[in-house]
Image (cartoon, rainbow, N blue to C red):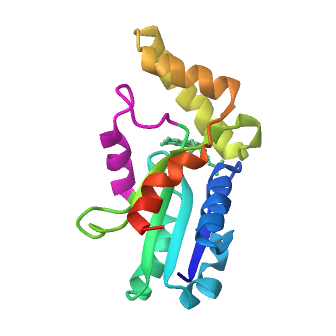
């Protein structure tokens, strides 16, 4: 399969997954700005990007490219700081967030998976540092009301972590038949 992985990454997690997936596909992993130059020669183009306030960075650009290349196959790896689906962090929440960027009525068959990335406050842009300080204050209010889930999330983000795990790509590889 002639494939390409394009990625959008601020602190490195989505890039890590892009490189792993490109190794598995035997193809290149390049930044999203190279999509128009390198994408058209490929059968499959995968976007590997991160959740930013429940939207996927670069999704608008990727959707425009998908619309202009109806005969290519596409897939998405959505990376976030939240834990992998479990009782406290249901898969339905990930699906809902993913569908903000790729609505089910327009992209019913788009293969995708969620992969936990990491959180590295010191590597964020100035504007994202401000956004996260506001978000931390919101989470703290929930923690004060007794939310155990938010307490875990807040502690992990305050301390910083790298939750990248190559195995999290398996569901997408299965959907793609690789
Ligand atoms: C402003 C901002 C908003 C974020 N919103 C979400 C979110 O809605 N859901 C989520 O799971 N992670 C969210 N994150 C966490 C990032 O998606 C996570 O840190 C990811 O691993 C970053 O990828 P990167 O290392 O490739 O930049 C947010 C991070 C920032 C800075």
Q: Is residue 87 magenta?
A: yes
Q: Is residue 89 magenta?
A: yes
- For the point 39% across and 82% down, the residue is 67
- For the point 56% across and 58% down, the residue is 49
| Region of the chain picked out in magenta, as a range | 82-100
The residue lying toward the viewer, choosing from 80 and 27, is 27
Q: Is residue 37 above or below residue 109?
A: below
Residue 61 visible in this rendered orientation of the protein: no
- For the point 33% across and 56% down, the residue is 99
Which residue sits furthest right? 122
Q: Position of residue 27 (x, y in %)?
A: 64, 75
Which residue sits furthest front? 178
Which residue sits furthest left? 105
The residue lying toward the viewer, choosing from 44 and 78, is 44
- For the point 60% across and 62% down, the residue is 21
Q: Position of residue 102 (x, y in %)?
A: 36, 63
Residue 37 visible in this rendered orientation of the protein: yes
Q: Is residue 80 above or below residue 71?
A: above
Q: Is residue 65 above or below residue 6?
A: below
Q: Position of residue 126 (x, y in %)?
A: 72, 44
Q: Quadrant of ligand 1?
A: top right
Q: Position of residue 83 (x, y in %)?
A: 49, 34
The residue lying toward the viewer, choosing from 123 and 80, is 80
């Amino acid at each position: 399969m002639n494939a390409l992985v394009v990625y959008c990454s601020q602190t490195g997690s989505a890039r890590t997954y892009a490189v792993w997936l490109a190794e598995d596909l035997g193809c290149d992993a390049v930044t999203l700005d190279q999509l128009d130059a390198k994408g058209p020669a490929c059968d499959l183009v995968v976007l590997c990007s991160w959740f930013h306030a429940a939207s996927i960075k670069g999704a608008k650009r990727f959707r425009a490219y998908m619309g202009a290349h109806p005969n290519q196959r596409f897939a998405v790896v959505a990376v976030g700081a939240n834990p992998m689906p479990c009782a406290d962090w249901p898969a339905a929440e990930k699906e809902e967030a993913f569908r903000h960027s790729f609505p089910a009525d327009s992209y019913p068959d788009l293969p995708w998976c969620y992969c936990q990335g990491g959180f590295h406050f010191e590597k964020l842009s100035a504007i994202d540092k401000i956004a996260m300080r506001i978000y931390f204050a919101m989470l703290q209010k929930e923690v004060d009301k007794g939310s155990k889930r938010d307490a875990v999330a807040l502690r992990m983000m305050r301390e910083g972590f790298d939750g990248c795990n190559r195995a999290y790509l398996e569901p997408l590889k299965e959907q793609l038949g690789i």
